[in-house]
Amino acid sequence: MKARIVFWLLQVLIALDQLANALLFFGWADETISARSWRQREKWQWRQARRVIDWIFALLGDSNHCQGAYESELQRSQLPETLR
């Protein structure tokens, strides 16, 4: 039961992240801000966003979060295995 709640919460957080990317930054509906920060890291504003996001997640033990988020998006890792 606890694992299902954690999975659900993670799905909600990903959905909110994707919504923020679409609404606030006119981004793709199915891309997180972290993944977009890595994908568009050549642009100054996204390079700065990537640095801030990676710094925050480094405090949690994930120093290359944006690159990992981008690769996760490519692999569709946020989806249940049956939908990948």
Image (cartoon, helix red, strand yellow):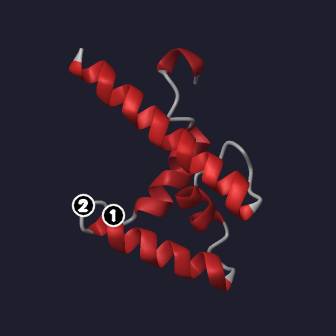
For label 2, the residue is 60
For residue 54, above or below residue 18: below
Rendered location of residue 79, percent (x, y): 52, 28
Element carrying mark 2: loop
Q: CA distance from mark 1 to mark 2?
A: 5 Å
Residue depicted at x 34% and y 69%: 56
Q: Nearer the viewer, residue 31 or 16?
A: 16
For residue 38, above or below residue 70: below
Answer whether residue 63 is visible to the viewer in this image. Answer: no
Element carrying mark 1: helix
Amino acid tagged 1: Phe
Residue depicted at x 63% and y 61%: 36
Could you tell me how many numbered marks the image carries?
2
For residue 70, which numbered disc appears in the image?
A: none
Answer whether residue 20 is visible to the viewer in this image. Answer: yes
Q: Is residue 24 left or right of residue 16?
A: right
Q: Is residue 50 left or right of residue 54?
A: right
Residue depicted at x 50% and y 42%: 14
Q: Is residue 7 left or right of residue 32?
A: left
Q: Residues within 10 Å of mark 1 (few under 14, many from 20)?
A: some
Residue depicted at x 24% and y 14%: 1
Q: Nearer the viewer, residue 70 or 33?
A: 33
Rendered location of residue 55, percent (x, y): 35, 74
Contact between labelled residues 2 and 1, with CB atoms less than 8 Å apart: yes
Q: Which corner quadrant holds the C terminus? A: top right
Rendered location of residue 80, percent (x, y): 49, 22
For label 1, the residue is 57
Q: Residue furthest bottom?
A: 44
